[in-house]
Image (cartoon, rainbow, N blue to C red):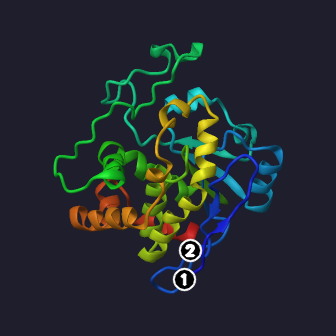
Amino acid sequence: MTAPLWIDLEGAVNVRDLGGLPTADGTAVRPDRLIRSDNLQGLTPSDVHVLLGDHDVRSVADLRTGVEVSAEGPGPLSREPSVRIANFSLFPEAGRRTDVASTDENGNGGGGPIVLPWQGRRLDLGDGKERGATAVYLRYLADRGQAAVDAVRFIATSPGATVVHCAAGKDRTGVVVALALSEVGVRRAAIVADYARSAERIEAIFGRLLGSRTYAADIAGQDLDKHRTRPQTMERLLAAMDEQFGGVPAWLRAHGWTDEDAAALRHKLVI
């Protein structure tokens, strides 16, 4: 099994090109088509050159919430006219089925503590079958399924390479990437192995988040090992998708995904 290529940058630590992941029909994901990453706010000019010049990055699917984007400010790629950036939040936010107030309503613009949309949020899917990260991932799809589908469609319809990222590049990013890879037939073992590889960079990921006012208070004092990506988490997610929805392709189609979307994604990633 071909391992995705780590892209070593100065301003991001969990970046890899998913080219080479094998499909069940004997093909593989093309290089420089789908890249996953943690937060891109710290990219240096050299990093931008690597992504645009060496990897043909032309679009960014930003999975962070509006609170995060507002708190962090525009990143370096937002200043590149050749790069299209779109936001697909996987958490309900202020005014959208949540009681968490927005940044402005909390006065966070004045330097106070930033209230992130997931803080104080109850996790109750009603079936009691899943716990931990798998339950969180299913909640993304229950609460913001259309945003997840729109993110995969954005990958399919964007030229060049698309970077998918959130804050750490492992949870929200892991779910959207798994949806895209499953739809084009990447072997499940390869999807699981790729998801788990973020554990190799967990110390660096936490170091970056602790250095940001947006995330530091949220993760300070937490057990780092609790946040490592483990193969069984993605295995359980994909198994739950099979059991509850008939698999990822069926779930996508139940949320408006079309045969034309599927063909476009396969053309982008595989053909």
> Residue most toward the bottom?
26
**Residue lying at 64% horizontally and 62% vertically, measured from the top left:** 16
User: In the rendered image, which residue does mark 1 sit on?
Assistant: 27
Residue 159 visible somewhere in the drawing: no
Q: Is residue 215 above or below residue 45?
A: above
**Residue lying at 54% horizontally and 34% vertically, measured from the top left:** 215
When asked about the image quadrant of residue 14, the answer is: bottom right
**Residue lying at 37% horizontally and 35% vertically, measured from the top left:** 92
Left or right of 41: which side holds 101? left
Q: Where is residue 145 in the image (x, y as percent from the top left)?
A: 35, 48
- Contact, CB < 8 Å: mark 1 with mark 2? yes
- Mark 1 vs 2, N-terminal side: 1
Residue 184 visible somewhere in the drawing: yes
Left or right of 242: which side holds 93? right
User: In the rendered image, which residue does mark 2 sit on?
Assistant: 270
| Residue 205, numbered circle | none
Amino acid type assigned to the residue bearing label 2 in the image: Val
Nearest the eye: 145 or 7: 7
Left or right of 12: which side holds 125? left
